Amino acid sequence: MRSLALAVCAFLSVLAACGGILLGTFLIVSPSGGGFFPNLGAILGLLVLGAGNLVSNICNGIYCWFGEPPRWLGIVTLVQSLSTLLFAGILVSGMARMS
């Protein structure tokens, strides 16, 4: 039962990361030519990327907590955490410039 839970957690991690990357990229590159909410697609794309990373990191943390984590999982978690910090820095600096 434990191995099934770990496999489901690993599958959800990959699904969240891939879904976040695909949907986020699609929203970022979609044309948003002004209108009532200009650049809404780009902002939603960054939020979807962040949400996918967050869900994937939570699933990776559960996998590491309950199972014997392989070495590659630590590297993947590190890369995801660094990219999350990068995008958070971009969002925070953008919000600081807007105010």
Image: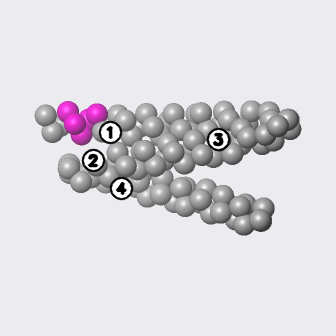
Instruction: Report the residue marked by disc 2.
Output: 63
Residue at the farthest front position: 36
Q: What's under tag 1, amino acid-wise?
A: Ala
Marks 2/3 in contact by CB < 8 Å: the verdict is no
User: Disc 4 residue type?
Assistant: Gly
Q: What residue type is labelled 2?
A: Tyr
Distance from disc 2 to disc 3, alpha carbons, whole Å, reads 27 Å
**Precedes in sequence: disc 3 or disc 1:** 1
Which numbered mark, 1 or 4, is in the foreground of this view? 1
Q: Do the residues labelled 1 and 2 touch (CB within 8 Å)?
A: yes
- In the rendered image, which residue does mark 3 sit on? 45
User: Which residue does the numbered mark 1 point to in the structure image?
Assistant: 10
The disc at residue 74 is 4
> Quick one: 21 or 52, which is closer to the camera?
52
Marks 3 and 1 sit apart, C-alpha to C-alpha, by 24 Å
Highlighted range, magenta: 4-8
Of residue 75 and residue 96, the one placed in the foreground of this image is 96
Of the image marks 2 and 4, the number of the one nearer the N terminus: 2
